[in-house]
Image (spheres, rainbow, N blue to C red):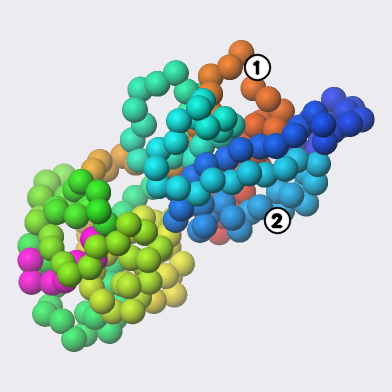
Amino acid sequence: MGKKLLKVLKIRNLKSFLGTLRVTASASFGLKCIVPLLSEFERLYPDLTIDLLLTDTVVDLFSERIDVAVRLGLLADSTLIAQQLMPTHYSVCASSGYLKRSRQIQHPHDLEHHNCLLFPLAGFRSRWIFKNRKGELSEIPVSGRTMISSAIALQQCAIAGMGLALLPNWLIDADLQAGTLIDVFPDYAVTATDFSTAAWLVYPSRAYVPLKVRMFTEFIRKSISDLTKT
């Protein structure tokens, strides 16, 4: 779709027209889901310069001159334009090695006897929320000896057998399919915040959305959609 758009516009000096696209995303999501797509995006649009800021800080789009942000979870009310990139969900996972040598886990309440790998945000570091198939909720206190401010680092610690981690599907789906990690509670939905979470493309509200923003959002949405279908 992006190529057709460029042909219609018939822009001779495309590089000066497009300039630089500034994008921000969380460090883990950016490394896992955005960076692997950049080579194809740059191949399609060689006249567009990409400036990617990976940070877990919520960046002010206006003061930092950000064109597009990828944000996770629930969005606060604002004047920004938001498009859902994909729904997300979480699983409590562990390596087979950890599960074999540790006390048996049959119910979320068993977590009190296990070492949990924690993320230093409210909820993630103190209690996880479970919902069974009847829709009944349970808040389970969690504790552990390791807390890391990187989802990818927690994923690697879980694979190494250090404990149980609450991790998002976009990070661990391949591990679950390969058996590198195991979903410990497949009969439960689990979260630390809300059960309806997603990844969002967010950009400033404008009467006219720049071509470079449209090109990027169209490309990312199609690429992510294709990946989730496989």
Q: Secondary structure at mark 2?
A: helix
Q: Amino acid at mark 2?
A: Ser
User: At 34% from the left edge and 28% from the top edge, which residue is drawn?
Assistant: 76
Which residue is depicted at the point 19% across and 55% down?
125
Give the quadrant of residue 151: bottom left
Q: Which mark is first along the chain, 2 or 1?
A: 2
Is any atom of residue 1 visible in this view? no
Q: Is residue 182 above or below residue 28?
A: below
Dot 1: few (<14), some (14–19), or many (≥20) neighbours within 10 Å?
few
Give the CA distance from mark 1 to mark 2: 27 Å
Say which quarter of the image contains residue 18: top right
Disc on res. 208: 1
Which SS class for mark 1?
Answer: loop
Question: 228 above or below 197?
Answer: below
Q: Position of residue 50 (x, y in %)?
A: 67, 44
Residue 15: x %, y % from top left: 82, 36
| Residue depicted at x 40% and y 63% | 152
The quadrant of the rendering that contains the N terminus is top right
The answer to whether residue 63 is left or right of residue 164 is right
Q: Would residue 28 be seen by someone viewing this image from the given angle? A: yes
Which numbered dot is residue 39?
Answer: 2
Q: Position of residue 69 (x, y in %)?
A: 51, 37
- Magenta range is 112-118
Residue 108 is covered by the magenta coloring: no
